């Protein structure tokens, strides 16, 4: 693969190197940066479309502002690859999203040019306002604070909370709205319609700026025309924009790919802004790479690909993905029950609900990047007698936790939570790991919590949730492909709080919760080669626990080991509480709980991450030998 020729980019080691460049050179630099971004992502895979959409904006921001003293904060930050290339990390782009490599998002420990880490949405304005107020209070080495937020992220309520607070404080703060009419999925909601109307009225924005007295924020070439426009508007009433009503000066919309417009506006804002100001830039996701531009999601995320054709390199699938099994199972249940509705928070493709929406468009709701609203929306649906399924990644459900507690659990409403990406997820790293949902749901009264050991179990759990009206119920499943088990045509509801015996054995019992069961079975094979025959059981439920099964395992074996893909405080902790209350520890039971370590695990391949977490077959084998006092072994033998 031939690298693009990039003579200007070759001379850039940091943002200060942009200062000597002419505006014409900055335009050429943007072209080189776009080519380099495409080349880099083609070798590693990753988020592509969002970064291509902000190439000119990235160059202009670093050329006009004094980063890293001026704090440039990217919302979500999946668009930050061009920013990384410009800020001294170009030579490491081939390590992107790999073990010990560059993060796919901004990360404070990676570079001083990343003043605030992100990977979840709608946080940038709050963080930038924090920097701005720290500056006002005398914090050293803090200049301007600039938040770059996409139109999709504006569907998250936290962004409005920050806008409202910033408008009240009236301190200098710069917000750039990167409006590409496309988040990961097509945008939804009134804000999208509002921004579209602003865009449609673009020729009149100079007139509005004149009428609102904001001529000073326009670049000098536009000021005279705006003054003339103001004369035309005498006697007319022009209403303010939503952003102006929140206390922001508003400039735009401007063409986010026109370097002259960007530089003019940013320089003027830098020179004159006193309070909060919002710059509305219209961009195109995937700009400059035809396969991305033509993709439905704007080339949001890709595996490795051929630059000439855009064709991606993907390994053949040996089994259906858990996400697809969930979607197809839910469609089967919904075909028999018109009370079933499905809800996603801006991730219809990622959760498989795009398939559900094709079959039942009136019963599928995308609430935007608004998990809090989505959870309470489901609570209202459940209170009205519907059977809502909230399909939300584990890491994103964290953002709706107060609503899970207050609006769902407290009222004992039968909302069904389909928790995708449970466990470690690979290249997206710690920000997207589903590490905490077992613990943060199992401690809630009224909740039922399940985990699928394989894709057939997932199908049964969808059926279980569909018929469970006694209260809230959740089932978790991992990212990626299933294990290739035989699949039932339709799921059969499970008995609530009942696990299953997988293998009868002796001396030690291994009780698995969730998708580590194949590793448990592999560990059993290794142990049997040593003459040890463990019992293996699949708990299925973290709440309610299968009390009879657990107490039987504890009483019939010398040792009991629990295994889960979650942080401490989850399944194993609940089992330990049960055993303690039943007095089993008083009788000499040896108990161990294998959980994710008390640390955030950086990105790597999923297999590498589970090695680091100590949850592989070799780790399980070693734990059994240790608990039986049979000595340590080489874990990787």
Image (cartoon, rainbow, N blue to C red):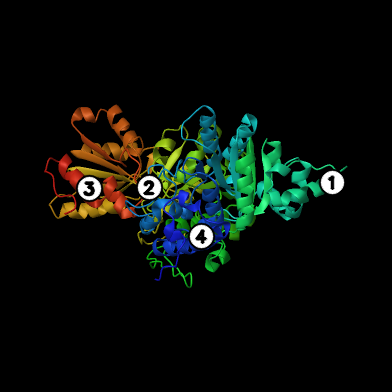
Q: Is residue 631 left or right of residue 199?
A: left
Closer to the camera in the image, 595 or 288: 288
- The mark tally for this picture is 4
Q: Is residue 33 visible?
A: yes
Q: Which residue is mark 2?
A: 423
Mark 2 vs 4, N-terminal side:
4
Q: Which type of secondary structure does the marked residue at label 4 adopt?
A: helix
Q: Which type of secondary structure does the marked residue at label 1 adopt?
A: helix
Query: How many angstroms separate mark 1 from mark 4 (CA)?
Result: 40 Å
Q: Do callouts 3 and 2 mark residues in contact (Cβ within 8 Å)?
A: no
Q: Which residue is mark 4?
A: 29
Which label is found at residue 231? 1
The residue drawn where x is 55% and y is 35% is 129
Q: Is residue 186 left or right of residue 513?
A: right
Mark 1 vs 4, N-terminal side:
4
Mark 3 vs 2, N-terminal side:
2
């Amino acid at each position: 693969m031939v690298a693009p020729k990039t003579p200007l980019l070759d001379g850039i080691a940091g943002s200060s190197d942009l200062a000597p460049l002419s505006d014409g050179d900055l335009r050429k630099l943007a072209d080189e940066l776009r080519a380099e971004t495409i080349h880099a992502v083609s070798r590693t895979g990753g988020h592509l479309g969002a970064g291509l959409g902000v190439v000119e904006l990235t160059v202009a921001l670093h050329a006009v502002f004094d980063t890293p003293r001026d704090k440039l904060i990217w919302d979500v930050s999946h668009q930050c690859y061009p920013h990384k290339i410009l800020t001294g990390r170009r030579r490491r782009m081939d390590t992107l999203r790999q073990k010990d490599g560059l993060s796919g998002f901004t990360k404070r420990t990676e570079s001083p040019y990343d003043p605030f880490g992100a990977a979840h949405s709608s946080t940038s304005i709050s963080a930038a306002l924090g920097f701005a107020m720290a500056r006002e209070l005398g914090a050293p080495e803090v200049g301007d604070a600039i938040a770059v937020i996409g139109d999709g992220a504006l569907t998250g309520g936290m962004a409005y909370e920050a806008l409202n607070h910033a408008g009240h404080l009236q301190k200098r703060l710069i917000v750039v709205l990167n409006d590409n009419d496309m988040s990961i999925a097509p945008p939804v909601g009134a804000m999208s319609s509002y921004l579209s109307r602003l865009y449609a009225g673009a020729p009149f924005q100079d007139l509005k700026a004149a009428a609102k007295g904001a001529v000073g924020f326009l670049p000098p070439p536009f000021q005279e025309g705006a003054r003339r426009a103001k004369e035309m508007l005498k006697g007319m009433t022009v209403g303010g924009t939503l952003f102006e009503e929140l206390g922001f000066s508003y400039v735009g919309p401007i063409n986010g790919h026109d370097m002259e417009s960007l530089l003019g506006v940013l320089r003027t804002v830098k020179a004159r802004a006193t309070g909060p100001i919002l710059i509305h830039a219209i961009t195109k996701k995937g700009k400059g790479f035809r396969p991305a531009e033509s993709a439905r999601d704007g080339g949001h995320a890709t595996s490795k690909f051929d630059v000439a054709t855009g064709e991606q390199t993907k390994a053949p699938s040996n089994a259906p993905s858990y996400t697809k099994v969930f979607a197809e199972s839910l469609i089967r249940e919904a075909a028999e029950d018109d009370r079933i509705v499905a809800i996603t928070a801006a991730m219809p493709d990622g959760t498989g609900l795009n398939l559900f929406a094709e079959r039942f468009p009136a019963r599928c709701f995308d609430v935007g990047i608004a998990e809090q609203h989505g959870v309470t929306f489901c609570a209202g649906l459940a209170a009205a007698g519907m059977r809502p399924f909230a399909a939300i990644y584990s890491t994103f459900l964290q953002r709706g936790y107060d609503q899970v507690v207050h609006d769902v659990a407290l009222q004992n409403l039968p909302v069904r939570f389909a928790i995708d990406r449970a466990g470690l997820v690979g290249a997206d790293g710690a920000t997207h790991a589903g590490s905490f949902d077992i613990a943060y749901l199992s401690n809630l009264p009224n909740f039922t919590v399940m985990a699928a050991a394989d894709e057939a179990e997932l199908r049964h759990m969808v059926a279980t949730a569909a018929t469970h009206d006694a209260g809230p119920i959740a089932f978790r499943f991992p990212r990626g492909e299933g294990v290739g088990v035989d699949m039932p045509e339709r799921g059969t509801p499970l008995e609530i709080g009942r696990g299953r015996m997988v293998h009868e054995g002796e001396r030690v019992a291994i009780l698995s919760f969730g998708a580590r069961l194949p590793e448990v079975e592999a560990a059993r094979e290794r142990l049997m080669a040593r003459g040890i025959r463990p019992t293996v059981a699949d708990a299925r439920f973290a709440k309610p626990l299968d009390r009879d099964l657990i107490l039987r395992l504890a009483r019939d074996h010398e040792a009991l080991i629990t295994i889960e893909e979650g942080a401490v405080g989850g399944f194993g902790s609940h089992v330990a509480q049960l055993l303690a209350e039943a007095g089993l520890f008083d009788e000499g039971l040896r108990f161990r709980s294998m959980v994710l370590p008390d640390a955030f695990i950086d990105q790597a391949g999923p297999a590498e991450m589970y090695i680091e977490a100590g949850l592989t077959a070799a780790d399980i084998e070693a734990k059994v030998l240790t608990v039986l006092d049979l000595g340590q072994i080489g874990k990787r033998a």
